[in-house]
Amino acid sequence: MKTKKYNKLVRDNIPAIIKAAGAKGIFKKLNAKDFKKELRSKLVEEAKELKKAKGETSMLKELADLTEVRNALAAEYNITPRQIETERRKRQRTRGGFKKKLFLKKVMK
């Protein structure tokens, strides 16, 4: 039997998907502290996949994955979507958005 190691957080339906494919997965349930840590790692993983996405369909899937992880992370820290949106708007007012498409090359002092 061929074995591939993953050592990463996966979605809830992955055990059934692996079983349906005729394979066996070894899983462990994470405690709250480790779950929060792994969600942060998963967020970075999904952001890297988004960076590599090619085409609109791939971009949509990766944005959906990133949003799913963001929502789970917010829930773990008891942060509501409303709080996120309020903070986003506040930061947009003070720091701006990305409409001007500015790329900072350097700052001289």
Image (cartoon, rainbow, N blue to C red):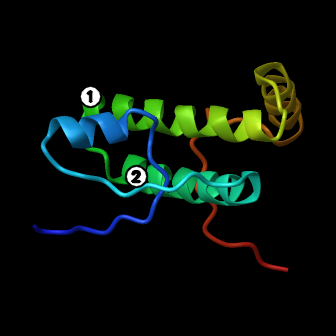
Q: Secondary structure at mark 2?
A: helix
Question: Quadrant of the rendered structure where residue 92 is?
Answer: top right
* Side of 74 relative to 63 (left or right): right
Instruction: Check disc 1 and give the amino acid type.
Output: Thr
Quadrant containing the N terminus is bottom left
Q: Nearer the N terminus, badge 1 or badge 2?
A: 2
**At which x and y percent is residue 88?**
79, 31
Give the residue pinned by disc 2: 51
Residue at figure coordinates x 35%, y 32% from the top left: 61
Instruction: Check disc 2 and give the amino acid type.
Output: Lys
* Side of 89 relative to 19 (left or right): right
Q: Which mark is residue 57?
A: 1
Disc 1 to disc 2, C-alpha distance: 14 Å
Residue at figure coordinates x 61%, y 48% from the top left: 102
* Side of 50 relative to 76 (left or right): left
Q: Secondary structure at mark 1?
A: helix
